[in-house]
Image: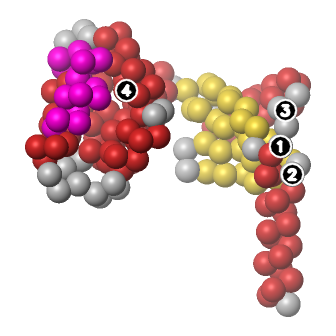
Amino acid sequence: MSGRIVAIRYATALYQVAVEKKMFEAIVGDLTRLNEIMGVALIREYCLKAHVNQVLEMKFINTAFIPYVSQTTGEMLKIAVRNGRLAALPYLFAAWKNIINQESGIVEVMLESADEAEQNIQQIIETKMAKRLGKKIKLNNIVVPKLLGGIRILWDNHLIDLSAIGRLKIMRALFKAV
């Protein structure tokens, strides 16, 4: 099972514990720190590679994460190691954010553009996406220079590709079909 899918399960369990034990702010802080630690490439890579020695993995967790998180989050991390699910940890923060957004009725929409999109363009896209999805939108503009021009709009598992590179790919496929 993929680390992303497993991360959803662990994030859901953490969310339920956070609500039950009224530890929401502590868990948010823990996951923020966990995400910062995952920003270190060597730590992220270690989590994502195949593992066979649970003792070494537990030492890794105890060194890299346990000192920086609450006991509750620490126990969840240890359970992940015991279950051979270390690869889920790099995706835990994103899974948590998705749960929070779902609970609050917000859809996170990524607007990718070759340059920073103008404010009025962002407002138009936010308004149209809110109308299309019938929910509140949290729009994030990400600069992706390889797009050359145009935009891509991503949410959940959906994509609207209005980029120059996307259109070139479509044209290339059409020419190959002829």
Q: Residues under labels 1 and 3: Cα distance?
A: 8 Å
Residue position for label 2: 148
Q: Residue at x 79, y 69 (%)?
A: 169
Q: Residues under labels 1 and 4: Cα distance?
A: 30 Å
Residue position for label 1: 114
Secondary structure of the residue carrying numbered label 3: loop
Q: Nearer the viewer, residue 141 or 65?
A: 65
Q: Tags 3 and 2 in contact by the CB under 8 Å rule?
A: no
Residue position for label 3: 117
Q: Nearer the viewer, residue 24 or 39?
A: 39
- Quadrant where the image shows the C terminus: bottom right
Q: Residue at x 29, y 29 (%)?
A: 64
Q: Tags 2 and 1 in contact by the CB under 8 Å rule?
A: yes
Q: Residue at x 72, y 36 (%)?
A: 142
In-image side of 139 versus 72 (left or right): right
Q: Earlier in the sequence, mark 2 or mark 4?
A: 4
Mark number, residue 34: 4
Q: Earlier in the sequence, mark 4 or mark 3?
A: 4
Q: Earlier in the sequence, mark 3 or mark 2?
A: 3
Q: Residues under labels 3 and 2: Cα distance?
A: 13 Å
Q: Which residues are magenta?
A: 58-73
Secondary structure of the residue carrying numbered label 2: loop
